Amino acid sequence: MSWCWSAGVGGAKLAHGLAQLVPPGRLTIIVNTGDDFWMYGLRICPDLDTLTYTLSGLVNPANGWGVAGDTFETLAAMKRYGEDTWFGIGDRDFATHLLRTQALRRGDSLTTVTHKLTSALGIAHTILPMTDAPIATKVDTVERGELDFQIYFVQQRWQPTVKALRYDGIEAASITPEVRRAIESADVILFGPSNPWLSIAPILGVPGMRDALIARDVPRVALSPIVGGEAIKGPAAKMMAELGYDVSARTVAAYYGDVINGFVYDALDAQMTIDGLRTATFDTIMRTDEDRAVLARRMVDWVSSWGDSG
Amino acid sequence: MSWCWSAGVGGAKLAHGLAQLVPPGRLTIIVNTGDDFWMYGLRICPDLDTLTYTLSGLVNPANGWGVAGDTFETLAAMKRYGEDTWFGIGDRDFATHLLRTQALRRGDSLTTVTHKLTSALGIAHTILPMTDAPIATKVDTVERGELDFQIYFVQQRWQPTVKALRYDGIEAASITPEVRRAIESADVILFGPSNPWLSIAPILGVPGMRDALIARDVPRVALSPIVGGEAIKGPAAKMMAELGYDVSARTVAAYYGDVINGFVYDALDAQMTIDGLRTATFDTIMRTDEDRAVLARRMVDWVSSWGDSG
């Protein structure tokens, strides 16, 4: 059994639960790179790094991103030089960005670089960027016009009102052979509890991705990031309302459309019916490491039972 | 009065003494860049940085290089990734290399970048790289063949026996307009107590530099790095012997040849006579900040007296 897991920042926790459940080498995680950007001449890939730090056990548990116990001396020196320091890069985190940027400049693909970095940290599963092409999510806002994603998300703390999103470079991108093989060989395809517009849309927008997924006659299951009409974390609910949608798990399921054939949402929303899909409701809020393992186990058990029930 | 001061690592201390003596903006320091190299995709310029940290007061006083109180978390993370970490870059130091590399990649010259960085740290004097062209000092050794400078100097702790040196890229280099103006307008030209082959030769080797210096009818004075037959710091004496020279201040004076018309060496060698040059002997070993100021004052007073004595 191999797994294909599309994760944004919100997906890293469940990915961690799955990684402990699935034998080494059998889990492939396809990651959004629309959040990637340049800072201080370095290529920074927040979603890849969050997942890498989570699966290697290095992650700062208080944030869910960054390296535990990291210090910020380089950033303090940047400030002394008069530089902007609104994006919090820790000293240990800088090593990741330095090595990635060096390898990219030498001509390595992001896929190759990511493999080297994750292997060096002892990660036995495979983490794949959704594409090797550079993609940049742009957020069009009422108050400030179009913003680069990290300006919207980190510098402006997702406060501007979202009018629309686009994914710069997406038309020219293509899915990598590694992503294609992962999808073609997956026994189950899961989508993390991630923001549809920020984390899932860029992945599904890579030309060829949607068709490759839909072609697979296996469980293709998304987990809702909306619980009881609110986002577990981040701007998903706020953005959903600003874009004119009903803030609910049902909106998330509709967003995926025919990409999925199954949907998991929170037990809190158990009264909600979602037609045309196999559904299950679990406790989906992961506060502890044990919560992750339990939810991963429940989802695995549930999709494994599909064959039994026809 | 403006000053032109050619300094390697060994020259930074006296440069600091001079910087306190000379009015803001009147001192120009021309720096060896033969030690520059690439590490982790960053352009590192040890001599420029040593001088920058010294003049800004940030320098680690224990080493004479690096930033005081710096930490090494990025380097520790590099090691975790399996990278070589023989060159000790501190976390605050990384900011300098990042900003320099980013600006160079954008197309700024090393001269421009250096001006930005030193200005941001409040340095009122001018620090100029000897050229904007990349130069790489190569050390040919008996035991290990030709080594990149930093491999010889830091990784091998200057233990291999030196056969010869060359300065890769020097023929194609040229002196910058800024360096030319500094030399043409200098009232005094001083050379730091630096290693002739490692720090001075690259500077003098830039096409046009030697002629520009000799053309100036002003005091052109070098300070000996050799005291009592030994180097104050670093491999100068060892290298001098390996290259077949008598290890003495006289060898240093002869090395400069007609580039200088005056020479300062240590009072310990006062019995030594050096023909064909104005000479002075002072206590030249700088252990404290006060030592720097005193030696700088003595050299300034001495060259100022040349006009009086004809």
Image: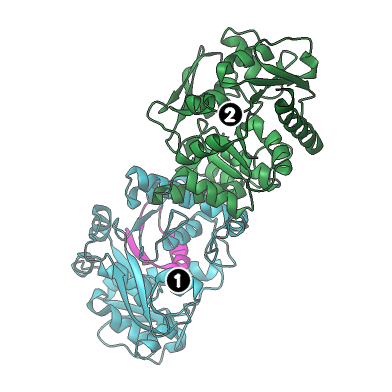
Chain colours: A cyan, B green
Q: Residue at the location (40% across, 71% down)?
A: A149
Q: Residue at the location (34% across, 52% down)?
A: A110
Q: Which residue occupies the foreground of this view, A55 or B268?
A: B268
Residue stretch in magenta: A1-28
Secondary element type, mark 1: helix
Residue B154 numbered tag:
2
Marks 2 and 1 sit apart, C-alpha to C-alpha, by 41 Å
> Could you tell me the amino acid type at mark 2?
Val
Q: Residue at the location (45% across, 60% down)?
A: A51
Q: Chain of mark 2?
A: B
Quadrant in the picture for residue A63: bottom right
Image coordinates of residue A301 in percent, x first then y, are: 38, 70
The quadrant in which the N terminus of chain A is found is bottom left
Secondary element type, mark 2: helix
In the image, residue B294 above or below residue A177: above
Quadrant in the picture for residue A131: bottom left
Label 2 environment density (alpha carbons within 10 Å; few <14, some 14–19, many ≥20): few
In the image, residue A251 above or below residue B155: below
Residue A151 numbered tag:
1
Q: Is residue A20 magenta?
A: yes
Q: Which residue occupies the foreground of this view, A142 or B120?
A: B120
Image coordinates of residue B107 in percent, x first then y, are: 39, 49
Camera sees residue A121: no
Q: Chain of mark 1?
A: A
Q: Is residue B293 magenta?
A: no
Image coordinates of residue A54 in percent, x first then y, are: 50, 60
